[in-house]
Amino acid sequence: MRDKADRSASPRRRVGVGDFASYGLIVGAVVLGWQIAIQPLMQRAPVEAAIRLAPGSPLVLQRAAESELAAGRVDNAAALSRDALARSPFDVRALRVLGLTEARAGREDAADDILTLAGNWSLRDDPAHAWLVERRLRRGDYASAFAHADTLVRRRQDIQPQVFRLFTVAGTEDPQRSLPVIASLLAARPPWRTAYLSGLNQTAQELQLAASLAILLQTSQAPLTNDELQRLYRTLLGKRQLEALRTVRGRINRPPPGAAVTNGGFADAAAPEPFQWRLVQRAGIVAEVVADDLRSSNPALRVDYDGYATGPVAEQLTSLAPGAYRFTAEVRTETGNPAARLAWTLYCATGGAVASVPAGVPNATPNAWTTVSARINVPDSCPAQWLRLETRAGDRRSRTVVWFDRIEISPAG
């Protein structure tokens, strides 16, 4: 009888243990499912509902703290943010809310310490960095303020106009202290560099700021690229800021102003426009820099002109001081009469021709290099000039093929 009783009791014990384990797994699964289910609610549900669902959640507490701060209930926001930090000491959003409550309470030094810590913990906390920008600017600390502004604008293109305006106002109103800081930021080649520099093109103050930054960046590890410098030069030219254009070119030495004609030998295309040859291609005019047929290692300008089309063939800007000069160019004729059909002309950038020189020697020996030379005078009221190779069209087509090399303008003395 005892054996029978033992046998009958044993299965019941095994069933009881199995049921207990099964119930435990079911309860655990329910709890886990509940936690998973309420996560979206904790993040997106109205704060009042989220508090009822998870009153001890750091996420819910920091959301509630932000809501209270936005509503102006500073003491509640401070208490909720401290409660959130007690449960999650590295919660950046809660730390930021706590710092802002300190600022609202007038304890700005404490707020500065807290929000600096929040900004250091997260480069993505925009409100913390925005407050730090304003605070550091009020203290005149451009380096720190602009470093936080850089953090903001690297992430958010939508606030570029506000941050760029901040840089520009500081650069124009307090250039002595702010310009070196702005230049230092730009020298790090941030992703917003091109957008900022290309936007300095509206007012005289912005153009002056762009010119000053170009000069400062020239001695940095990241001077203006040719594209950036070309954009600045063309903007100054388009705004008729010719003295500023001469000044920038002279200060940064790009291209060296000592050479009146840049790349006169057509071997160096590194200089930016407009202080570089711009070749025009159109129906009836083909201009290209190619290897000389007679001197294969020497590049030169070859022009194929139908004798009928009109317009410039090649041009570049120069900045000659008033005075007397001598223009020289080497010329080689393949066919036609370049002396009658083409001319080198110097125009004042403010309007009016200064001099014109026939682009060939009459009755020159074909396929032999000769030199064209003429004296020119630059008047006082001409701060910059265009040197252009232009057509002299006839009333019928008459093909001219001619080469040019070693274009120079030197003082007449």
Image (tube, rainbow, N blue to C red):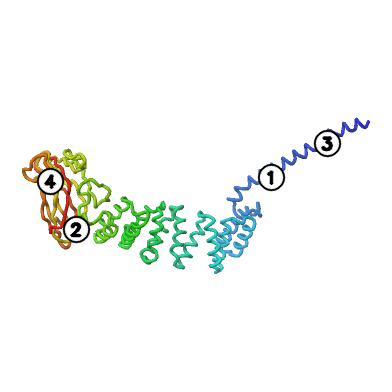
- The residue at which mark 4 appears reads as 342
Instruction: Give the label, 2 or 1, closer to the camera.
Output: 2
Residue at position x 54%, y 64% in the image: 113
Residue 197 placement (x, y as % from top left): 35, 55
**Cα–Cα span, label 2 and label 1:** 84 Å
Mark earlier in primary sequence (4, 1): 1
**Cα–Cα span, label 4 and label 1:** 90 Å
Using residue 352 as the reference point, say whether residue 6 is left or right of it: right
In the rendered image of this protein, does residue 183 appear above or below residue 278?
Answer: below
Q: Residue furthest right?
A: 1
Instruction: Give the label, 4 or 1, closer to the camera.
Output: 4
Residue 238: image quadrant is: bottom left
Can residue 397 be seen from the camera position used here?
Answer: no
The reply to whether dot 2 and dot 3 touch (C-beta < 8 Å) is no
- The residue at which mark 3 appears reads as 13
Residue at position x 11%, y 51% in the image: 373
- The residue at which mark 2 appears reads as 320
- The residue at which mark 1 appears reads as 31
**Cα–Cα span, label 2 and label 3:** 108 Å
Instruction: Give the label, 2 or 3, closer to the camera.
Output: 2
Q: Give the camera-side residue of 382 and 105.
A: 382
Residue 41 placement (x, y as % from top left): 61, 49
Q: Residue furthest bottom?
A: 106
Q: Secondary structure at mark 4?
A: strand
The reply to whether dot 4 and dot 3 touch (C-beta < 8 Å) is no
Residue at position x 44%, y 62% in the image: 143
Using residue 108 as the reference point, say whether residue 259 is left or right of it: left
**Cα–Cα span, label 3 and label 1:** 27 Å
Residue 147: image quadrant is: bottom left
Q: Amino acid at mark 1?
A: Val
